[in-house]
Image (cartoon, grey):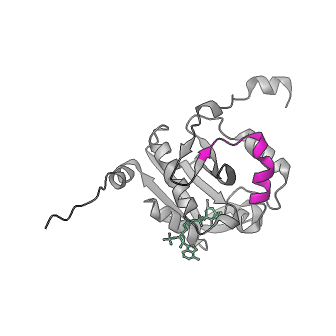
Amino acid sequence: MTLSEQAFAPARRDDVVPVLATARLKLRAPRRSDCKAITVLVNDRRIAANTARIPHPYAIEDAEQFIAAVNKREGEACFVITLDSAPIGVCSVELREDGPELGYWLGVAHWGRGFATEAARALIDHAFGDLEHEALISGARVNNPASRRVLEKCGFQWTGVRLSRIRAINSAAPVDRFRLDRGLWASLKSWGHVNRVA
Ligand SMILES: CC(C)(COP(=O)(O)OP(=O)(O)OC[C@H]1O[C@@H](n2cnc3c(N)ncnc32)[C@H](O)[C@@H]1OP(=O)(O)O)[C@@H](O)C(=O)NCCC(=O)NCCS
């Protein structure tokens, strides 16, 4: 980056990205020191092929570029998902053409334990709370039932299907689209326990 580019690059907003704690996980802003761990976790075609923009194979330079680019715009938030202080994946809300979009991935060794749902719920609360978004969108390839299920467990509703470009396969693929609005989120959050009294 040249000096003049540095002067105009938006400042990092890591200081306003909070640390979110769930029952088992902590979510925090990615750091440069996460590059190696992120590269090892994400360098798997099963992850890249189910996301829009992650390259495959994935090199340390890709992690450096990724970390340099995130958490710069108001309304966006990118977190490393950690378990016992070790990174296990990434989740983010990014501002896209259609609105704020939720995305997430976990290292394959960590699949199947409910971590994605747990992290997504924390990020959704942050997106409707601190970030004050009115609605979130997300997507899952039609052959990715695990991601679809994560979105459904978080209250997202199916809105249609469209072809989206997938960088890792250098092609487009059908992707189910989902939406969660503030009203539905608030309703789910306020759904308390019912006490059986007789
Ligand atoms: C999608 C992904 C994040 C899920 O992570 P995870 O921690 O295993 O997800 P969870 O355990 O929270 O939930 C997965 C749900 O899908 C279900 N599931 C998993 N595989 C499934 C399958 N083949 N068919 C149907 N349901 C399936 C699980 O049973 C679980 O639902 P349940 O709690 O009702 O039983 C992980 O697989 C991943 O990183 N995939 C690659 C990247 C990706 O797809 N990102 C999302 C697109 S942005």
Q: Is residue 7 magenta?
A: no
Name the chief secondary structure element in magenta: helix
**What x and y, as percent, mark residue 41?**
75, 59
**What x and y, as percent, mark residue 173?**
66, 68
What residue lies at 50% left-to-right and 38% top-to-bottom? 131
Which segment did they paint magenta?
Answer: 27-42
What residue lies at 65% left-to-right and 41% top-to-bottom? 29
Q: Is residue 33 magenta?
A: yes
Toward the front, the furthest residue is 84
Quadrant position of residue 43: bottom right
Indicate the quadrant containing the N terminus: top left, top right, bottom left or bottom right. Answer: top right
128 left or right, relative to 107: left
- Against 85, residue 153 (above or below) is below
Indicate the quadrant containing the C terminus: top left, top right, bottom left or bottom right. Answer: bottom left
Ligand 1: quadrant of the figure: bottom right
5 left or right, relative to 174: right
Q: Is residue 96 visible?
A: no
**What x and y, as percent, mark residue 122?**
50, 49
Toward the left, the furthest residue is 198
Quadrant position of residue 114: bottom right
- Against 119, residue 17 (above or below) is above
